[in-house]
Amino acid sequence: MTLVKETRPASVDILILGAGWTSTFLIPLLEKEKVTYAATTTTGRDDTFKFKFDPDNNDPKQYAVLPTAKTVLITFPLKGKQQSTQLVKSYNGSHETGISSYQFIQLGSAGIWTIPDQETWVTRHSKYDKSDTRAIAEDELLSLGGCVLDLSGLWGGERQAKHWLDRVAATKEQLKGKKSLHMVHGLDVARGILAVHRNFKHAARERWMLTDCFIYDWWALILGFAGEQDNDNSNNEREKTQIKWVGELMTEDNVRALPRSTEQLGRCYDSREFWNTFGLMPVRARI
């Protein structure tokens, strides 16, 4: 991939602050759509701009070398009060030509809606944890005219749910507490970002929830993935543990079949509003 180099001034459509996992899906899409872009890393590797946000050291020089961009995508978490203001004002203050109003997009986590006594069906308008440090920074960015995309679990490339079995279900007791799971593929995150960039009038000052429109049941996933892994490994190790535990838990909780009902799963995200607003649907759904 070819990025705009730091050695020449540039004006681009999208500036990616933090070229991490998301950029591996976003950059190929931007190139396909002929959308100009530049990206930053903390080291300046691969012809990216060197940039590291430090709330305690607001060096204007590192902002000044960044290109002018219509949209600034913040992929790393901002936390608490003043960080969003610091970043927005620092960028705006060092780029006072060309574009009168920059479009800031913050990537966040749908985990802010995981709170006690939450309603079964959760939308972007539902109650969220206002004390969460990331939510505080997001609210601040929204007040400045930005947009927040709160993402459910990310998958794609090397991130595959089948690799998480031992982390999420190491014991039967741990498996018992696993209910719903919501995911979104990196390509659909990239498509969502591009749609917001192109239709920011619908996105400004709004927090959106992104999922692939599926509600996954952890028990159903583990039952399927564990069997696949036993087959791949030519053994029955997981049949003795995770597969056996799922069967026992289904009997104990009187679950007749998987996936469990929405009432049994307890937390179900409804992200239709984002996809409807921007005229899209996920193209990489069902993990």
Image (spheres, rainbow, N blue to C red):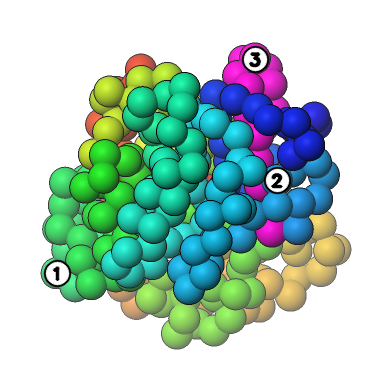
Where the C terminus falls, by quadrant? top right
On the question of residue 237 being in view, the answer is: yes
1 vs 3, front mark: 3
**Which portion, as a residue range, is magenta?**
28-42
Q: Amino acid at mark 3?
A: Lys
Q: Indicate the position of residue 72 as horizontal and vertical percent values.
A: 48, 38
Classify mark 2: helix, strand or loop: strand
The mark nearer the N terminus, 3 or 2, is 3
Residue under the image location 38 percent in, 76 percent down: 177
Residue 49: numbered disc: 2
Q: Residue furthest right?
A: 234
Q: Is residue 168 left or right of residue 138?
A: right
Residue under the image location 55 percent in, 24 percent down: 13
Contact, CB < 8 Å: mark 1 with mark 3?
no
Task: Tell me how far mark 3 sits from mark 2, CA to CA.
Answer: 20 Å
Q: Which residue is mark 3?
A: 34
Residue under the image location 48 percent in, 73 percent down: 56
- Of 212 and 265, the residue lying toward us: 212
On the question of residue 110 being in view, the answer is: no
